[in-house]
């Protein structure tokens, strides 16, 4: 009967056990993401992030996220995070920042997404900045890369799920109706004496006054002339 040496069996068993352990240990996740409703087209979903501290000399002070296609900054509102940290929207995502955390302390926070897109997964490219200015860039879409972006895998949408309309702040505003404007009058055409009830200008009243004076003078002249002729 053929017998396998015990030493060989021990080596083979150890190798198999090592392989099993390597397969069971997940890849190191530097920034993790999870959701209470990880399903396509789910609404008002709380998405939580765990940004692991990678520095031995400084703490995290800011986390910036670039949103995936299908989620706009207007679709996201702040949930909760480190004490004193503030949320602000950017052109392509948002930032959460505040007082520098203790060295080695991970940044944990959450946001609420109005609706998840109808896709199989969404990647949230993340840049985390430390107090000393160092930036960790978790932006690779390849989950096996050296700097993978935190990615949320989604279940298929529910049969009755439908996309909601765009957020009010992202809806296109109606184009304002063009208003026709008349050209400003030139200084020569501007009438500044039109303040009487009859609507006549000061120049018109001046002309009338001159006419009256001339008429009175003519009458006086005629009367005197007639009187002279009679004498």
Image (cartoon, rainbow, N blue to C red):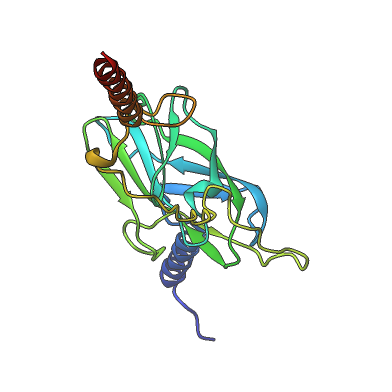
Give the farthest residue toward the front. Answer: 231
Query: Is residue 174 placed above or below 12 in the rendered structure?
Result: above
Position of the N terminus, as image quadrant, is: bottom right
Q: Who is closer to the viewer here, 152 or 102?
A: 152
Residue in the picture at 48% in, 63% down: 23
Q: Who is closer to the viewer here, 154 or 65?
A: 65
Residue 103 lies, in percent from the top left, at: 32, 28
Residue 101 lies, in percent from the top left, at: 36, 26
Residue 142 lies, in percent from the top left, at: 39, 66
Q: Is residue 157 left or right of residue 143?
A: right
Q: Who is closer to the viewer here, 178 or 51?
A: 178
Residue 10 lies, in percent from the top left, at: 45, 66
Q: Is residue 8 left or right of residue 162?
A: left
Query: Is residue 18 placed above or below 211 in the rendered structure?
Result: below
Give the farthest residue toward the bottom. Answer: 1
Give the farthest residue toward the right. Answer: 160
Query: Is residue 207 placed above or below 51 in the rendered structure?
Result: above
Q: Quadrant of residue 106?
A: top left
Please tell me how many numbered marks the rendered image carries.
0
């Amino acid at each position: 009967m053929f017998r396998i040496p015990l030493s060989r069996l021990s080596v083979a068993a150890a190798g198999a056990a090592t392989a099993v352990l390597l397969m069971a240990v997940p890849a190191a996740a530097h920034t993790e993401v999870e959701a209470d409703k990880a399903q396509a087209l789910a609404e008002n979903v709380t998405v939580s992030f765990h940004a692991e501290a990678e520095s031995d000399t400084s703490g995290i002070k800011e986390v910036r996220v670039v949103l995936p296609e299908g989620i706009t900054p207007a679709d996201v509102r702040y949930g909760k995070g480190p004490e004193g940290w503030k949320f602000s929207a950017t052109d392509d995502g948002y930032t959460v920042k505040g007082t520098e955390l203790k060295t080695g302390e991970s940044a944990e926070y959450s946001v609420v997404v109005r609706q998840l897109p109808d896709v199989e997964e969404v990647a949230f490219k993340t840049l985390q900045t430390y107090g000393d200015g160092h930036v960790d860039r978790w932006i690779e879409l390849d989950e096996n890369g050296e700097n993978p972006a935190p990615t949320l895998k989604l279940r298929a949408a529910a049969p009755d799920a439908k996309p909601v309309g765009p957020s009010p702040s992202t809806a296109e505003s109606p184009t304002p109706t063009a208003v026709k404007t008349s050209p400003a009058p030139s200084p020569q055409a501007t009438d500044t004496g039109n303040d009487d009830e009859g609507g006549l200008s000061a120049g018109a009243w001046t002309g009338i006054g001159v006419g009256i004076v001339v008429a009175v003078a003519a009458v006086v002249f005629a009367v005197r002339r007639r009187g002279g002729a009679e004498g």
